[in-house]
Amino acid sequence: MPVRSPEFIEQLGRAYALGTMPARLLAIAYAITPTELLHLARRYGWTTRSEILSTTTPAERAIAARAAEAARDRELYGDAVDDVRLLRSRGFVVVREGAGFMVGNQRCTFAQIEAKAARERSVRSALPQRSGRV
């Protein structure tokens, strides 16, 4: 079994505990095998998914899911996470592709992501502000 970072283990443990997706899909989402997921759950003593589902409310699971997604984005995109979120909010499709990124159908570097985000910020600030009443 490959060595995993403590952050990865913690994030995977939180996602496992949420119980919002089957273990097989969770393993695929984290690029590990279902067997490795089972071994990690046993090794770190993660609570079984059915126990978690019976003791948490849907609101608590939703909050934890948002936190897990934010942590996953931070791990995946690093310092570019804020720029990626901005571009996605503007309708861009941004994915991690090896050492770089794909924005739509364009391969980009970290610097290009920052430039695109800066351009979107300047375009947004240049638009006239609407009043509260229409």
Image: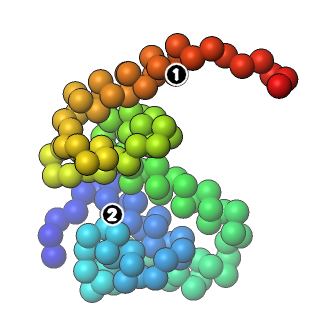
Amino acid type shown at disc 2: Ile
Question: Horizontally, is 19 left or right of 96 in the view?
Answer: right
Tell me residue 94's x, y (percent).
Answer: 34, 47
Residue at disc 2, secondary structure: helix
Q: Residue at 20% across / 38% down in the picture?
A: 108
Q: Relative to 123, say whether 83 is above or below.
A: below
Residue 3 appears in the picture as rendered: yes
- Mark 2 or mark 1: name the one nearer the start of the chain: 2
Question: Horizontally, is 81 left or right of 109 in the view?
Answer: right
Seen from the viewer's position, the closer of residues 52 and 34 is: 34
Q: Relative to 83, say whether 30 is above or below.
A: below
Tell me residue 128's x, y (percent).
Answer: 63, 14
Image quarter where the C terminus lies is: top right
Q: Within the image, what quadrant is residue 113 found in?
A: top left
Q: Residue at 39% across / 75% down in the picture?
A: 26
Between disc 2 and disc 1, the foreground one is 1
Seen from the viewer's position, the closer of residues 91 and 14 is: 91
Q: Which residue was labeled with disc 1? A: 124
Q: Which residue reaches farthest front?
A: 134
Residue at disc 1, secondary structure: helix
Whole-number angstrom distance, CA of label 2 to CA of label 1: 38 Å
